[in-house]
Structure formats: C-alpha cells, structure tokens
Amino acid sequence: MLLAIGHRAEEDDERADHRPLDEDIGRRGDVECDAAEANPYIDVPLATGMGEMRNALIVRAAQAAIAIGGGWGTLSEIAMAQRIKTPVVGLHDAFPSAIDIPRVSSPAAAVAWALEQAARPEV
C-alpha cells in the first residue's frame, strides 16, 4: 500500500493526465465523514471517522509514504513514519530545512521512489 499524506494530497497533481498507479487510495479522517465525499480521483476511499487518531494506523499500514503539504497532521505522519522506519519522501512539503527526508519535485518521481522503497525486502 502506498499513501500520500498531507493536506489535499490526492488533488496535488493533475491525475486526469497522469495515473501512475492502478488504484489510488485516499483517506478521510474527519470524525463525521462519508466515503462518498472522497476526491473523485480516489478509487479506494478510507473513511476512518477517527480524526487524527487515524495517522498512526495509516502510516503503520503503508509500505511507503509521500508527504505533501505541511500541516500538523503531515508533520505527525512524517514523524511516525520515521520512527517505525516506513520510507517517506517529500513532495512540495513545508519542512525542507527542518526534516531530513528524501525529496522529489514531481508526483511521478514521488510514486517511482515510493514503489522502489515498497519493493525492498526489509520494508
């Protein structure tokens, strides 16, 4: 499982022209949420209804993560990924001078990096 973390992560690129994965997985963590309200580019919506508590569960389930944006939730997900050794790459994240993670400049490069990391035997 690959996960894009961060505010509006699933809308960050123009997926109408670029679909690097067969399925896009997205999550909504609002306490009151409905999978039907997910971004239209999401094939598998995960409406956890858990608010911020979902961060640890989702990061733990991911084989690799792509950090997009830079709110408190993104920061906590990066920290959890680092702590449990889930590979994480930054794509236009807000923490380049504060957090030492690999960074890429395009959605395609982020997906390629994440797929490579997820395929490693130690992940």
Image (cartoon, grey):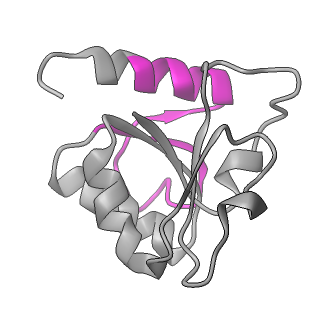
Please name the residue shown 22% across and 16% down the image. 120
Find residue 43 and report its image quarter. Answer: top right
Please name the residue shown 39% across and 69% down the image. 54
Is residue 67 among what the camera can see? yes
Name the side, left or right, on which 23 lies relative to 79.
right
**Number of numbered labels in the structure image:** 0
Please name the residue shown 48% across and 80% down the image. 51
Residue 94 image offset from top left, x and y in percent: 58, 60
Q: Is residue 112 magenta?
A: yes
> Looking at the rendering, in which quadrant would you find the N terminus?
top left
- Magenta residues (range): 87-115
Name the side, left or right, on which 13 lies relative to 21.
right
Between 7 and 97, the one nearer to me in the picture: 7
- 56, above or below 90, in the image: below
Is residue 106 among what the camera can see? no
Residue 78 image offset from top left, x and y in percent: 37, 57
- 25, above or below 75, in the image: above
Name the side, left or right, on which 48 lies relative to 13.
left
Name the side, left or right, on which 100 lies relative to 27.
left
Q: Is residue 28 magenta?
A: no
Please name the residue shown 69% across and 42% down the image. 42
Between 3 and 101, the one nearer to me in the picture: 3
Residue 16 image offset from top left, x and y in percent: 88, 27
